[in-house]
Image (spheres, coloured by chain):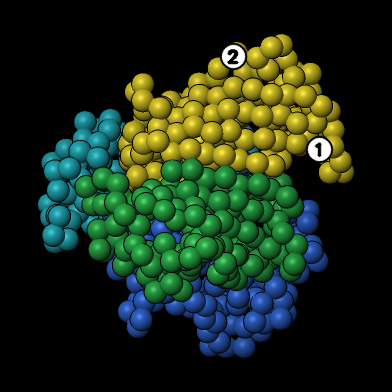
Chain colours: A cyan, B blue, C green, D yellow
Amino acid sequence: MRVTELEYRVPYADTDRMGIVYYANYLIYFERIRNEILREAGLPYRILEEQGLMLPVVEAVCRYKAPARYDDMLSLKGWVSEAKGARTRIECEVYKDNELLVNGYTIHAAVNAAGRPARLPETLIALKPEA
Amino acid sequence: MRVTELEYRVPYADTDRMGIVYYANYLIYFERIRNEILREAGLPYRILEEQGLMLPVVEAVCRYKAPARYDDMLSLKGWVSEAKGARTRIECEVYKDNELLVNGYTIHAAVNAAGRPARLPETLIALKPEA
Amino acid sequence: MRVTELEYRVPYADTDRMGIVYYANYLIYFERIRNEILREAGLPYRILEEQGLMLPVVEAVCRYKAPARYDDMLSLKGWVSEAKGARTRIECEVYKDNELLVNGYTIHAAVNAAGRPARLPETLIALKPEA
Amino acid sequence: MRVTELEYRVPYADTDRMGIVYYANYLIYFERIRNEILREAGLPYRILEEQGLMLPVVEAVCRYKAPARYDDMLSLKGWVSEAKGARTRIECEVYKDNELLVNGYTIHAAVNAAGRPARLPETLIALKPEA
């Protein structure tokens, strides 16, 4: 299992009046780490799209265990847990120091420019654990 | 089952370069409908907080079936599906015209000002289906 | 001078840990009122774009006088103050009850699908004060 | 003049259906660079707040010259241009490669925990050009 990591500093913009990171923002953190997973694999999502392949999200799940706060330096971790046919699942975790704050995953469908199901690129399939 | 509805017009701000509403924004739509569920029940969340009760999100799930787009007038629907002890679950749906675009739910823990588990208010418990 | 108005309820999402609406969000409020100005004039921005005209922002100015807070029902007001050739300026104000919280404006260039300067539509030019 | 720099990778979340970074997001970029200006000066804003001083924005100005796009690695630059009494002005610029995409500034009032005008910290005053 190949884990990608990315550091992220929490701006004021991400917090809410409870003094913690607003829950929807973690889905943006998930996107940031997904971008890096693909970049590390040599297949940036921007390039995928230029080649006519898109990976829209079909499901997102997020579990909130402890809050992140303004100015925290977070560690975002992510990896491909499933990739078969036209569907992939990517796991995401958000840490502060060594404490797991949030985890979850997104499921993506591969579609071509016409919006039709398409095969995942081999590079992405090769990222799943058993591969 | 008491369903609360709210109309919402999609601004440019909510869209992404795929031309559709960015996936994290639906969690904000879910919050908008949750606010109205509590307001309709006579217990606005702002008042709850002033009384020392908070309902932080512990889990969020979102399923994306069809995209919303700029300037769409969406119908947000929501209802309390579970409410027991210190935990409640709220279902959310996003429609355009009569098409279901997105559904999901959030699970919330009731905590007091000290961050300790607290009993849900009776008004909220009374909203669950079997009540 | 034709003033367009729109009500907007502040969600938790828009606040920051200072307990007030985060400053960048007012530019989204400005967009919401601009959308309604054009809609009221019979020329929704979505239609403008479909006709090949875009109005990208070239300058935005925002002055913060008093904070808006969670659950506030705001009144957003806006009007076209200048519209000539390929450029227009739209004024925006945010009120709570009758108190002005924020004001400002955006300046937009009219460009065609090729990104070239284009004439503003007559409908928009007709909205400026002296017209 | 002491210029602080910060790199920032544009996520999908920041773009809109025009395919470019939505205009309000630059104010968040401005915040990111302001945070680093203060951190570099040895006075992180989080610490300032813990000491009872806040710097709410009273005015923001942003000029959009060229668009940033998804996956761009931007260079955010900022510096203190004015700092006197209870008021400071911070300049911000956003570059891609060596092209200036956006510039602007924010003006901040220093206030204490009671919301009263307060003197800027000497560390911040010392950052202005002539100092």
Is D125 located above or below residue A60 in the figure?
above
Q: Which chain letter goes with mark 2?
A: D
Residue at horizontal 73 percent and vertical 50 percent from the top:
C65
User: Within 10 Å of the Cα at label 1, are there few (<14), some (14-19), or many (20+) other Cα atoms?
Assistant: some
Instruction: Report if the CB atoms under discs 2 and 1 are less than 8 Å apart.
Output: no
Residue at horizontal 40 percent and vertical 36 percent from the top:
D65
Q: Residue furthest front?
A: C130
Is B130 located above or below residue D1 in the figure?
below
* Quadrant in which the N terminus of chain D is drawn: top right
Badge 2 or badge 1: first in the primary sequence? 2
* Quadrant in which the C terminus of chain D is drawn: top right
Q: Amino acid at mark 1?
A: Val
Point out residue C50 in the picture as x, y percentages from the top left corner: 26, 64
Q: Quadrant of residue B51?
A: bottom right
Return the residue at label 2. Answer: D2
Q: SS at mark 2?
A: loop
Q: Amino acid at mark 2?
A: Arg
Q: Is residue A120 left or right of residue D3?
A: left
Q: SS at mark 1?
A: strand
Tags 2 and 1 both on a single chain: yes
Return the residue at label 1. Answer: D111
Q: Residue furthest top?
A: D131
Point out residue A35 in the picture as x, y percentages from the top left corner: 33, 39
Residue at horizontal 71 percent and vertical 29 percent from the top:
D88
Q: Which chain letter goes with mark 1?
A: D
Residue at horizontal 68 percent and vertical 63 percent from the top:
C95
Nearest the eye: B23 or A120: B23
The answer to whether residue B17 is visible is no
Is C110 located above or below residue B63 in the figure?
above
Point out residue D10 in the picture as x, y percentages from the top left corner: 39, 38
Nearest the eye: B121 or D61: D61
